Image: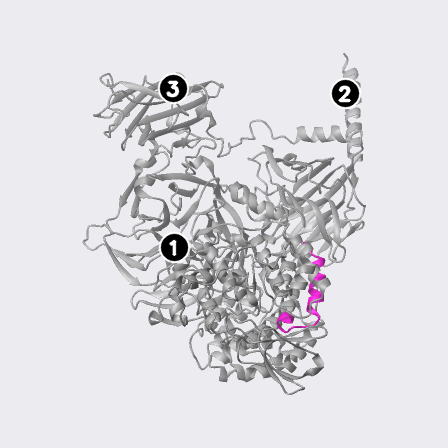
């Protein structure tokens, strides 16, 4: 071939290739011209073109209330390939496809989204916006069947691929039929086959700006290729192949569930022990030597993995290096990477094993793969050498074991009963597990090491961790196994193993700490269910041996006494306790920065449907400042559910991680686990049952970060850690349920903070309990809790960034100091307080405004009450009104109502309107009911605002208008309920629910079938109205409850809806209930189908004090059948319905269990006139003929029934009169109910009746102790 011929052919080939390339590129349509937003539609205040790219941005001054989108105007597309280059920062972004525009005004979109998220597990995942939530995360291949249930069927992508949010990344979306694939930089991040009943096959394209923190996103090279039926499948296959990770780069870590399945495969290891004395408790020593590759071989060891366990315990060494301890056969030594222990040539395994009674056995398997692909396997079998005693350096290859002559025997292959396959696959020894650092993921640049696996039988399950002034660690068992000190050798590493760890049990007789702190030479030890102790060394031998009780607050176990940490000034201690712990006795409370607290609920609450925290009232969980010298507390913050731990950041501010109530999922009052800034005087609004405050209440504060479902445990600040700067400034929050340590990255937000979380360290399972920064700059953490297997881990930084202590000033310090100057007035009277605080009541900074209000509330009201009435600034008047409602008295009510009426609510921004509505509510709660005239004026002002575009505003309007008995609120609320549209919660992307599939699957089920929570709240509030209902409204209401019951929720969700339905039905007449029976599900049969017998007696004249002696704990011995009979025999059923049976003169009592306790019921029966319901109170009725009748007056359409007051057992017919005969009807101070209802009953019968009323008609109810 001539050179010319070669060049000619080369040019032809090149021309053909270029032609193909041009054709391929030409098949893509450019959707963005690089100049302006032609062909796109969105909110101009957020979207623009800068430097030739689409630029989306929100700021603090210009936020978006909800996710907003830039929508391509080219119509819907079905099968396609879409690609763009994108970068983002501040919050996550995304690209919508096969979607629909559900709010053209606000540019709200619903449908599939290729999620662009900073978290490595979410970057490139599929999120169903306004729809199904997370469908498939990064690295997942998912199939969704026709039943709508997703199933992870494989793994895709490259776990070594590092993606950075503010770097240009190319996103590609391929959608063909039921298959959808996302790729980032050419690597598949998610592969979904979607046959969900609601799956979409076409829709619009849009770009996302996310609500929340200020953010920026940019897009360029936006291209679309619409696929035809002829090329769709081939294009899809080409992307499937091209998106696979490069071989050798995609190193996949096996899941925790199957990472050790190889142990049971051939060759199978054998359980071995000595032939004679098989159950001896004396130590047994085992050795086995093996060889692979020539000694000194340069061929690399590609991988090595190891498994060993022993009944009952063992320590294993290889070549003299400690591999690990096995504290019991249930908790094996598992190493996914054991390369450090083996070497070319000879290798020596050495084992010290022990038995604690009964049969004994040891099992071992090691698998080594060399670079040439050869696999070498070592298993335990009877060829191993055994000895009863050892001498010299018996762990090395040079040791002569020729005299080791104890005979070994096999007790069967691995998998044999009674041991099974502990720690392998699904066999986790009755829920217990062993731990390995190989199964724990940590942020880039960090490493995690297993320091110590706790022998549970002897040392329990560790839940609390701290350090002393020498850098030694202390850990406490949750139960009664004691307190332990852990000392690490300075040279300790995962290579030296547990022989570098010294664990000593302290002689002091304390255990069960849920918080510990070293302070001024002593260990402060806070137990969950008993007082705090100061633990010291009384003998000078260096061991803690003496415990001094400090104060006597007895907590409620896991909701009891919790954290204790030194204050920012080092002079005192902060102490935290959960919501089942009373505040310390008043005699040792020196003061409170929270000037007042109450339930502050405008409408009656519903206690938890399953009885949790029934009767627990404010303050809920609390935080105090404790002075060890005076033994006195100052209350700092309250209103938490169960904040287990607290921590300070570098700025000296206090934070906690509060728990959710998982049974509330789906209900309007569900509050996710959240990071709270525990500022002075704060009340975060936990109230039991349905009473939890929303975070927009003016007398509360928002979370710094709402995380989602979980179980908060330890919290620790990053100060002192030898980590990069941003990790030193982080707060570390531990979630026990989802096995995650979150790094909470704080950002100044005025005088407070906001934050985003990073899944810093996680595993499945990894039940993290507590963490502490060690003196060496490492982060130590424990796992365990509730009696499960426990371990101690360490995280260190091994990357290239500087770990020098951070000293740079934190932005915003000036305004934080301003907040602190106001906090100095909290709980203290000061002549300058009002003058200095008042100007800040108008602040737009909520943290500063809150601090100012608490400073004002701490001063006598006569100094500042008039300021509220004369205040001209709108925000200051609202804030001042909240303060006066909380601290004033009834004499302030009318003037305060007038001051609120003088405002113009229609012109207020949402935050101020919510503040105004809360000010009204607090006024009526604290200062008294409005007059009739005030009621009409407030209704007139607020009624016109309903409905509002804000669901939060609607909630508070309905609340107030129901309280005020507005004549229009039922119609308006029912209309909003009828148009219910469930909205996924904002926290849906924050938690990886697969880290706990058992619990996480329930949350995912709820998210996939999200209840209309706001509308359920309207229904909840409407239940308080007795008048104003039409049959159409009642029917719509019951139908809404029936529909809501089809959604998913927490453990109390369905029972709450049933209680709600029963309560509303309980207000209706028999005729109304019968008319609704076709949709209510009631078996309407008001006649008992069982024999009613008279009380046995003998009776007596019961007093409340006497009767209460026979309830309480005695209710557990109550007889259900007897109680049911007595309800009818004692004539209760003459007026009251219960469990579908009885009259309708008085209220239905079926749901009293949701509101009242035994003492309240006894008081209502024995002293019925003490509190009389407006609806069921008696009237003194004057008739035209001069007769005066006293009794319950029931107004029907054409007649009035007056039921006279009667004695127990007496049947009196009602007097029926024409409405025109009634001259007047006044409230009677005497209840319609007889005072002698119980007097025919004996003590056991009183017990049985009260228990029956508290059972709700359920013979298996908790009241019976079953």
Which is closer to the viewer, label 3 or label 1?
1
Examine the image and state in which quarter residue 497 appears. Answer: top left
Q: Decide: marks 2, 1 in contact (CB < 8 A)?
A: no
Q: Is residue 1180 above or below residue 176?
A: below
Residue at far top of view: 1
Q: CA distance from mark 2 to mark 1?
A: 81 Å
**Pointer 3 with pointer 2, Cβ within 8 A:** no
Q: Secondary structure at mark 2?
A: helix
Residue under label 3, please give it.
296
Q: Which mark is residue 10?
A: 2
Residue 51 seen anywhere in this rendered image of the structure: no
**Res. 365 image quadrant:** top left
Q: Earlier in the sequence, mark 3 or mark 2?
A: 2
Magenta-drawn stretch contains 1256: no
Between 972 and 768, the one nearer to me in the picture: 972
Choose the circle earlier in sequence order: 2 or 1: 2
From the image, tell me which residue sits under label 1: 557
46 lies above or below 201: below
Query: Which range is magenta?
Result: 960-981
């Amino acid at each position: 071939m001539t050179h010319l011929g070669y060049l000619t052919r080369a040019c032809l080939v090149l021309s053909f290739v270029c032609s193909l390339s041009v054709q391929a590129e030409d098949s893509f349509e450019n959707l963005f011209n690089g100049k302006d937003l032609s062909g796109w539609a969105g909110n101009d205040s957020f979207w623009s073109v800068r430097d030739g790219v689409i630029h989306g941005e929100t700021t603090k001054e210009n936020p978006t209330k909800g996710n907003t989108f830039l929508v391509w105007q080219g119509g819907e597309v079905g099968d396609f390939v879409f690609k763009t280059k994108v970068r983002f920062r501040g919050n996550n972004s995304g690209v919508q496809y096969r979607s629909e525009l559900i709010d053209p005004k606000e540019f709200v979109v619903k449908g599939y989204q290729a999620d662009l998220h900073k978290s490595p597990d979410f970057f490139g995942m599929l999120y169903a916006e306004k729809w199904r939530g997370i469908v498939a995360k990064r690295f997942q291949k998912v199939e969704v069947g026709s039943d709508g249930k997703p199933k992870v069927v494989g793994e895709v992508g490259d776990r070594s691929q590092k993606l950075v949010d503010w770097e240009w990344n190319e996103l590609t979306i391929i959608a063909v039929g039921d298959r959808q694939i996302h790729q980032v930089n050419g690597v598949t991040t998610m592969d979904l086959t979607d046959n969900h009943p609601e799956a979409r096959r076409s829709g619009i394209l849009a770009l996302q700006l996310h609500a929340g923190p200020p953010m920026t996103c940019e897009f360029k090279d936006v291209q679309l290729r619409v696929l035809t039926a002829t090329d769709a499948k081939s294009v899809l296959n080409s992307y499937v192949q091209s998106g696979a990770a490069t071989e050798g780069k995609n190193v996949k870590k096996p899941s925790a569930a199957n990472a050790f399945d190889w142990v049971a495969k051939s060759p199978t290891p054998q359980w071995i022990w000595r032939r004679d004395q098989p159950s001896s408790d004396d130590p047994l020593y085992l050795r086995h030597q093996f060889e692979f590759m020539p000694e000194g071989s340069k061929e690399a060891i590609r991988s090595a993995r190891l498994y060993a366990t022993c009944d009952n315990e063992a320590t294993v060494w290889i070549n003299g290096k400690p591999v690990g301890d096995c504290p019991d056969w249930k908790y094996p030594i598992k190493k996914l990477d054991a390369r450090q222990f083996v070497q070319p040539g000879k290798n020596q395994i050495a084992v010290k094993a022990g038995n604690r009674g009964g049969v004994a056995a040891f099992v071992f398997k090691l698998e080594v793969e060399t670079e040439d692909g050869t696999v070498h396997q070592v298993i335990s079998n009877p060829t191993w050498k055994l000895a009863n005693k050892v001498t010299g350096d018996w762990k090395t290859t040079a040791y002569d074991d020729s005299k080791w002559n104890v005979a070994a025997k096999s007790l069967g292959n691995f998998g044999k009963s009674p041991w099974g396959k502990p720690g392998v696959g699904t066999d986790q020894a009755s829920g217990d597990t062993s731990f390995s650092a190989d199964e724990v993921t940590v942020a880039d640049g960090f490493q995690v090491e297993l320091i110590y696996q706790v022998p549970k039988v002897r040392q329990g399950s560790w839940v609390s961790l701290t350090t002393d002034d020498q850098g030694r660690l202390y850990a406490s068992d949750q139960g009664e196994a004691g307190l332990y000190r852990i000392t690490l050798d300075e040279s300790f590493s995962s290579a030296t193993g547990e022989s570098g760890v010294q664990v000593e049990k302290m002689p002091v007789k304390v255990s069960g700490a849920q918080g510990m702190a070293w302070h001024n030479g002593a260990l402060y030890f806070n137990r969950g269910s008993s007082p705090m102790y100061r633990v010291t060394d009384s003998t000078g031998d260096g061991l803690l041996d003496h415990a001094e009780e400090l104060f006597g607050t007895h907590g409620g176990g896991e909701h009891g006494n919790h954290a204790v940490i030194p204050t920012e000034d080092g002079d005192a201690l902060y102490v935290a306790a959960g919501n089942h712990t009373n505040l310390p006795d008043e005699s040792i409370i020196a003061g409170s920065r929270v000037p007042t607290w109450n339930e502050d609920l405008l409408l009656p609450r519903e206690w938890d449907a399953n009885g949790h925290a029934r009767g627990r009232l404010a303050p809920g969980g609390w935080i105090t400042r404790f002075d060890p010298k005076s033994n006195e507390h100052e209350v700092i913050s309250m209103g938490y559910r169960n904040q287990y731990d607290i921590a300070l950041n570098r700025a000296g501010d206090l934070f906690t991680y509060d728990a959710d109530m998982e049974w509330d999922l789906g209900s309007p009052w569900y509050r996710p686990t959240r990071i709270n800034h525990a500022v002075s005087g704060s009340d975060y609004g936990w109230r039991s049952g349905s009473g939890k405050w929303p975070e927009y209440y003016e007398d509360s504060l928002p979370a710094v970060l709402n995380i989602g479902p979980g179980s908060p445990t330890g919290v620790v600040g990053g100060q002192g850690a030898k980590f990069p700067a941003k990790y030193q400034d982080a707060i570390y929050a531990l979630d026990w349920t989802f096995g995650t340590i979150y790094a909470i990255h704080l950002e100044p937000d005025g005088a407070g903070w906001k934050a985003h979380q990073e899944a810093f360290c996680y595993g499945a399972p990894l039940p993290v309990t507590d963490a502490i920064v060690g003196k060496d700059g490492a982060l130590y953490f424990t796992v365990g809790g509730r009696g499960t297997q426990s371990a101690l881990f360490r995280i260190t930084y091994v990357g290239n960034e500087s770990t020098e202590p951070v000293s740079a000033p934190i932005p915003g310090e000036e305004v934080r100091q301003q907040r602190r100057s106001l906090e100095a007035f909290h709980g203290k009277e000061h002549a300058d307080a009002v003058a200095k605080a008042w100007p800040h009541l108008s602040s737009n900074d909520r943290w500063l405004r809150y601090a100012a209000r608490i400073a004002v509330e701490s001063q006598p009201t006569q100094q500042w009450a008039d300021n509220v009435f004369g205040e001209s600034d709108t925000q200051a008047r609202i804030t001042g009104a909240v303060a006066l409602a909380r601290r004033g008295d009834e004499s302030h009510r009318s003037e305060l109502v007038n001051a609120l009426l003088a405002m113009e609510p229609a012109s207020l921004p949402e935050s101020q309107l919510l503040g105004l509505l809360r000010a009204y509510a607090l006024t009526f709660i604290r200062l008294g009911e409005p007059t009739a005239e005030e009621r009409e004026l407030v209704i007139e002002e607020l009624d016109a605002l309903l409905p509002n575009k804000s669901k939060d505003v609607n909630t508070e309007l309905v609340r107030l208008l129901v309280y005020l008995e507005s004549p229009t609120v039922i119609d308006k609320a029912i209309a909003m309920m009828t148009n219910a549209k469930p909205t996924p919660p904002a926290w849906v992307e924050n938690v990886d629910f697969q880290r706990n599939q058992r619990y996480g699957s329930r949350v995912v089920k709820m998210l996939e079938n999200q209840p209309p929570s706001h509308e359920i709240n309207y229904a909840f509030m409407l239940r308080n109205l007795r008048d104003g209902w039409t049959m159409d409204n009642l029917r719509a209401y019951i139908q809404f409850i029936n529909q809501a019951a089809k959604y998913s929720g927490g453990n109390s969700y369905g029972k709450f809806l049933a209680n709600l339905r029963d309560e509303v039905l309980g207000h209706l007449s028999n005729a109304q209930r019968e008319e609704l029976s076709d949709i209510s599900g009631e078996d309407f049969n008001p006649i008992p189908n069982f024999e009613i017998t008279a009380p046995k007696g003998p009776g007596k004249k019961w007093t409340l004090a006497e009767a209460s002696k026979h309830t309480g704990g005695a209710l557990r011995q109550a007889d259900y059948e007897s109680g049911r009979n007595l309800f009818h025999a004692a004539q209760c059923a003459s007026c009251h319905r219960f469990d579908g049976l009885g009259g309708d003169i008085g209220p239905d009592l079926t749901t009293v269990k949701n509101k009242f306790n035994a003492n309240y019921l006894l008081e209502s029966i024995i002293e019925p006139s003490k509190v009389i319901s407006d609806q069921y109170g008696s009237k003194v009725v004057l008739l035209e003929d001069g007769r005066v009748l006293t009794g319950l007056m029931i107004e029907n359409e054409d007649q009035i029934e007056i039921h006279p007051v009667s004695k127990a057992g007496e049947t009196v017919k009602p007097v029926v009169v024409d409405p025109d005969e009634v001259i007047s009807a006044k409230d009677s101070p005497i209840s319609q109910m007889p005072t002698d209802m119980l007097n025919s009953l004996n003590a056991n019968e009183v017990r049985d009746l009260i228990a029956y009323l508290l059972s709700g008609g359920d013979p298996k109810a908790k009241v019976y102790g079953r």
